[in-house]
């Protein structure tokens, strides 16, 4: 069976989106709402798209980005990142992070602080390889996901973003094809 | 001066090409640091002694106010008031031990400076790179005021003011102001100002970084402006005393010097200074009311003022000691700035190690216990406690240690051992342990150096450049 990207993608209108300037908490609420409205037979959404004033997608906020916002003391975090550059071992840096976390505020306080932070400080901007035209062939989508190690691609049509092609939907399509092949094997 | 301008632009271009990966542009930092018009105003000079191999080759270079000793070649380079001190270079037949190899030198080592600009920089020691034992090279490199390039072959790099690169082969790196790096081998690294990094791969790793805002009070360097801050003010305030030393042909110092001690003719010595046996005072050192006990030393660009050093003290290149009392065998690392006050003296107990690039600046008396390891920025008792540990306790570290802004990974005993060995080596090399028969060092060998001066073209296209000069035994 020949898959079409626009049939596999989640249309932008069904995806969780927030505007620049929103808080992390508003982003999480948007994700929850999108999930409620979404077809429950499909896999859950795992990210929120961030839009600018012109409703153009400018970034993506993943689960990991939200968790990253809970990391205590950004300044110390930067210092620890520097240590990697200067030849310190992973074990040492992990133990320092653990010490810092133990000294930091309880999880409830970290969450309260994090929910007020702005999405633009934690979102990831998209790279060139994360865009795909809706009419290109399915194997190109597979190649882009694999080559860029991406969890999703932004699907474009006439320079507008029209949807999200998620790894999970591509996987489901591949799995479906394999099952079809199995039934036709001699 | 056409040729000098061309040379200046060419060196910057070459350095920038090497640094293109870091995105660092040398030009705005160095453009106004030296006035090329003044390169004709200062003579260069070299020393001759019976104790050091002699060979100077100056090719298409400007050498204003710079000093040379040992075996040195400069090619297509601009050196401004720099000290190129080749009295610790390896000699033919010396054997270097490296990871189970015994490598014999087939010829004397030389310092080879090419396509580089060195401004008030000290070059000393010898190459520790087993791949280039006969050549301590400095290529396509720009270094700025009071930087130290110590036993570190350097290629395509920028060294900020008061920075030190020590026993490290460096390629395509930027070393920020007042950073100290001793890490065997580094490449393509941009080290932020005020980073103190001592690493022996697979053995230990020590790292500290000054808080940027507090460091700026002492040294601040941005593109388009000369270095600023208390360190610059401190040396500028004492600049005039050196002017006289360089203007006068025969100079008489106002102190008596024992027969086995050495006081360089280009050091400044003010009243009430005392020099004991086996003391070494290098050129561009500044002593004022300084009591130097047996075997103490003051190396290049050191300032010792209203202070007493009990003996066998190492005051490494560029260290400054004001209103302090140092016990026996206290080590003060490169470019450290120790400032007590007349009514708030600094006391450092014997056998302590003050890490390179430490700042101790106090308004109340401070007493550092004997056998301490001290680093970073210290203004009072609380910051001393955050930035020090006893050497005995530190020797027990087997894996990790962190305190304040300092991080250490590895074997504490090995780290302490390396410092102890190095202090011992410096004392030996400086002649601090000379007993009248054995252990002669710089304090004995550097006596009675003859100095010759050389001059550049006074005007014309080559103004400021020196003609090709070869000086051989």
Image (cartoon, coloured by chain):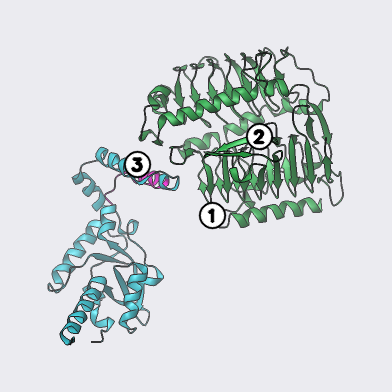
Which chain has been coloured cyan in this picture?
A
Q: Chain of mark 1?
A: B
- Residue occupying image coordinates x 30% and y 56%: A118
Q: Is residue A97 left or right of residue B168?
A: left
**Crowd around label 1: few <14 · some 14–19 · many ≥20 (10 Å):** some
Q: Report x, y in % for residue B160.
A: 59, 42
Q: Is residue B55 magenta?
A: no
Under circle 2, the secondary element is loop
User: Which secondary structure, mark 1?
Assistant: loop
**Placement of B35 over or under B330, stated as above or below:** below
Q: Nearer the viewer, mark 2 or mark 1?
A: 2
Q: Which mark is residue B94?
A: 2
Q: Which quadrant holds the N terminus of chain A?
A: bottom left
What is the magenta range? A69-82
Q: Quadrant of residue B302?
A: top right
Tag 2 subunit? B
* In magenta stretch: residue A81: yes
Which chain is green in the picture? B
Q: Which residue is mark 1?
A: B22
Q: CA distance from mark 2 to mark 3?
A: 40 Å
Can you tell which quarter of the image residue B219 is in?
top right
Residue B243: x percent and y percent? Answer: 76, 28
Query: Mark 2 or 3, which is nearer the eye?
Result: 2
Left or right: B318 with respect to B206?
Answer: right
């Amino acid at each position: 069976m020949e898959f079409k990207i626009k049939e596999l993608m989640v249309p932008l209108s069904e995806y969780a989106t927030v505007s620049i300037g929103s808080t992390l908490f508003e982003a999480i609420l948007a994700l929850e709402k999108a999930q409620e409205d979404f077809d429950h037979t499909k896999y859950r959404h795992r990210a929120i798209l961030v839009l600018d004033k012109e409703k153009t997608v400018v970034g993506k906020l993943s689960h990991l980005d939200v968790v990253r916002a809970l990391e205590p003391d950004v300044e110390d975090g930067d210092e620890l990142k520097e240590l990697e550059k200067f030849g310190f071992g992973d074990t040492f840096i992990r133990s320092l992070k653990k010490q810092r976390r133990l000294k930091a505020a309880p999880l409830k306080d970290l969450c309260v602080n994090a929910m007020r932070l702005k999405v633009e400080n934690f979102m990831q901007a998209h790279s060139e390889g994360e865009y795909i035209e809706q009419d290109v062939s399915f194997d190109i989508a597979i190649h882009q996901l694999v080559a860029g190690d991406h969890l999703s691609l932004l699907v474009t049509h006439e320079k507008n973003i029209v949807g999200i092609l998620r790894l999970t939907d591509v996987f489901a399509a591949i799995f479906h094809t394999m099952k079809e092949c199995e039934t036709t094997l001699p | 001066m056409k040729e000098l301008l061309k040379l200046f632009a060419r060196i910057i271009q070459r350095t920038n090409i090497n640094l293109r990966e870091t995105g660092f542009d040398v030009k705005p930092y160095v453009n106004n640091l030296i006035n090329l018009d003044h390169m004709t105003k200062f003579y260069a000079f070299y020393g001759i002694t019976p104790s050091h191999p002699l060979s100077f080759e100056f090719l298409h270079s400007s050498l204003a106010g710079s000093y040379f000793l040992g075996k040195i070649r400069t090619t297509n380079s601009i050196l401004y008031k720099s000290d190129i001190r080749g009295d610790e270079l390896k000699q033919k037949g010396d054997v270097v031990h490296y990871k189970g190899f015994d490598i014999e030198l087939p010829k004397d080592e030389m310092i080879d400076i090419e396509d580089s600009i060195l401004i008030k920089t000290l070059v000393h020691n010898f190459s520790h790179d087993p791949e280039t034992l006969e050549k301590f090279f400095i290529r396509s490199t720009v270094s700025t005021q009071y930087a130290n390039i110590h036993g570190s072959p350097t290629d395509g790099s920028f060294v900020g003011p008061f920075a030190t690169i020590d026993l490290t082969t460096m390629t395509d790196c930027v070393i920020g102001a007042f950073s100290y790096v001793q890490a065997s081998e580094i490449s393509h690294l941009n080290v932020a100002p005020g980073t103190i990094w001592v690493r022996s791969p697979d053995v230990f790793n020590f790292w500290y970084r000054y808080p940027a805002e507090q460091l700026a009070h002492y040294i601040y360097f941005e593109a388009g402006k000369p270095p600023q801050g208390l360190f610059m003010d401190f040396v500028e305030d004492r600049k005039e005393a050196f002017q006289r030393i360089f203007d006068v042909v025969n100079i008489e110092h106002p102190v008596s010097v024992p027969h086995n001690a050495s006081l360089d003719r280009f050091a400044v010595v003010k009243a009430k200074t005392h020099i004991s046996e086996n003391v070494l005072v290098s050129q561009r050192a500044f002593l004022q009311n300084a009591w130097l006990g047996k075997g103490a030393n003051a190396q290049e660009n050191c300032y010792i003022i209203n202070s007493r050093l009990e003996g066998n003290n190492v005051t490494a290149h560029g260290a400054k000691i004001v209103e302090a009392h140092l016990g026996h065998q206290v080590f003060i690392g490169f470019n450290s700035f120790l400032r007590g006050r007349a009514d708030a003296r600094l006391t450092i107990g014997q056998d302590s190690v003050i890490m390179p690039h430490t700042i101790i600046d106090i308004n109340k008396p401070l007493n550092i216990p004997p056998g301490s390891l001290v680093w970073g920025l210290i203004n009072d008792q609380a910051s001393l406690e955050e930035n020090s540990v006893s050497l005995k306790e530190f020797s027990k570290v087997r894996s990790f240690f962190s305190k304040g802004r300092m991080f250490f990974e590895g074997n504490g005993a090995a780290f302490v051992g390396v410092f102890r060995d190095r202090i011992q080596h410096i004392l030996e090399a400086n002649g601090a342990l000379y007993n009248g028969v054995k252990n002669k060092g710089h304090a004995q060998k550097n006596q009675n150096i003859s100095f010759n001066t050389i001059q550049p073209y006074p005007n014309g296209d080559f103004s400021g450049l020196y003609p090709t000069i070869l000086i051989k035994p």
